[in-house]
Each structure stands twice: as structure tokens, then as C-alpha cells.
Image: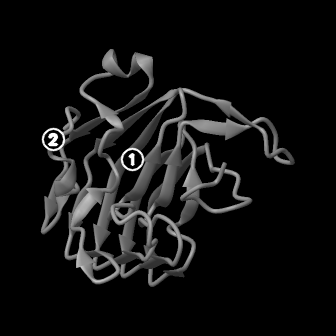
Amino acid sequence: DTEGGCAGTIPFDGHLDFNGATVMGMYNTQGGLFAEVGPNATFKNVSLKNLYSYNEAGPAGTIAGYANSYKYTDADSTEQTVANGNLEAENIEISNCYVNSKDSKNNNFVGALIGRFRCVDGKIGVHINNCFAYNNTVLYNTEDRACLLGDVLNTFKSSAEDAETGGAYIKIENTVTIGITPYHALAETNSGQ
């Protein structure tokens, strides 16, 4: 099932340490550095500057458009298995980036870091540590969606223990966002904050 994602995409589910590198000036129409990431993906030590991330029919972010709680059984398979994990982003700077999703069915699938989280019977933890985001433009079409994480409504639980029954939880620490919120304002009634 690739609803809201990118058809035929195998999610990246590894560990990537950029060792302090800067990714600058990238133009992307698949929703992020990675179109989709899996529940165990880790990204560390990178500056993302002046990126243009756009998706006509799906989620968009700088690191990834889509984060999933499932993975494929092998690289040649379309069969998915549920996987539990902890997605981590550490020591990341996001500045002067433009992120836009024009998905006509899903107007919250956009965020400065990750556009959408999808939990399929499993659980996914999100740990964001020591990140700094400023001077970014995050839009759905022309509407402002100034947030770090998109589509958190009805997905996130308040703790890892609550997520045991399925869902996701967020832990954000030592992180500064200027001009954007941690998640989209429409999700403010959600328990996981």
C-alpha cells in the first residue's frame, strides 16, 4: 500500500552519519532526501541549507516525505511486514529551505523535517535531539504549514508505553525552531506533544 507515499519506493531504514557535511542547494521533487524512511532510520550531523523539496502528489520534508512503521520483506518484494523502531534525528540544522506538498487529499503532509508518519499496526518512536530549524518556508500549496513534523494528528501517543498498542510517540529535546512549531497546529488536541 503506497497511499500518500511514493509508489515503488523501498524505505531507507539504515543509519546515516553525515559527519558534519552540508547539503546545499538540492532541488528535489520526490518529497525529501529520501522519499520514504523506515522505523529504524537514523540521521546525524548534517546541515540542510537552501533545499527545495516539493511533491505534487504526496508528503514532503527535507529529510523525508514519509516515515513508515513497516518495511518490505526484501528488495524485490512488494510484501510488507510490520516493524517497530525508533527513528532518530540528531545534530541537524535546517535553514533557508522551501518545502511544499500539493497533495490534494492530504493538506497536512508537509513538515520542515518529515512530512508524514504512518503507523500500520506497529509502533514508531521519533527522537529528535539537538536540532536547529530557522528561516524555512513550509507550505501546503500556498497555505502556511510552519512545522517541523507534519501529519501527527491521531498518530502519536503520549509515551512509549501508550504506543505499545500501535502508534507513534515523539521525544524532542535540546531543539530550537524559529518561525515554525514542532508539529502542525491542527494537531494540538492530540495527546503526544
Note whether 7 is above or below 152 in the view shown. Answer: below
Q: What amino acid is at disc 2?
A: Thr
- Residue furthest toward the front? 105
Instruction: Specify few, some or many for label 1: CA neighbours under 10 Å numbering under 14, 14-19, or 20 or more.
Output: many
Residue occupying the point 57% across, 55% down = 36
Q: Which residue in the structure is indicated by mark 1? A: 89
* Location of residue 138 in the rendering, given as x and y in whole percent from the top left corner: 29, 73
Residue 66 location (% of width, % of height)? 50, 55
Residue 173 is left or right of residue 8, and the answer is left
Query: Of discs 2 and 1, which sits in the foreground?
Result: 2
Residue 45 sits in quarter: bottom left
Which numbered disc, 2 or 1, marks the residue that appears first in the sequence? 1
44 on left or right of 159: right
- Percent position (x, y) of residue 2? 64, 54
The answer to whether residue 45 is seen in the rendering is no
Q: Residue at x 48, y 61 (%)?
A: 65
Q: Can the viewer see residue 60 in this picture?
A: yes
Q: Quadrant of residue 169?
A: top left
Per the image, label 2 sits on a secondary structure element best described as loop
Residue at mark 2 to residue at mark 1: CA–CA distance: 25 Å
| Spot occupied by residue 59 in the image (x, y as percentages of width and height) | 47, 64
The quarter of the rendered structure image containing the C terminus is top left
Q: Residue at x 46, y 61 (%)?
A: 63
**Outermost residue to the right:** 76
Q: Looking at the image, which residue is at 32% across and 46% down?
A: 152
Label 1 sits on a secondary structure element that is: strand
Residue matched to label 2: 189
Between 179 and 104, the one lying in front of the other is 104
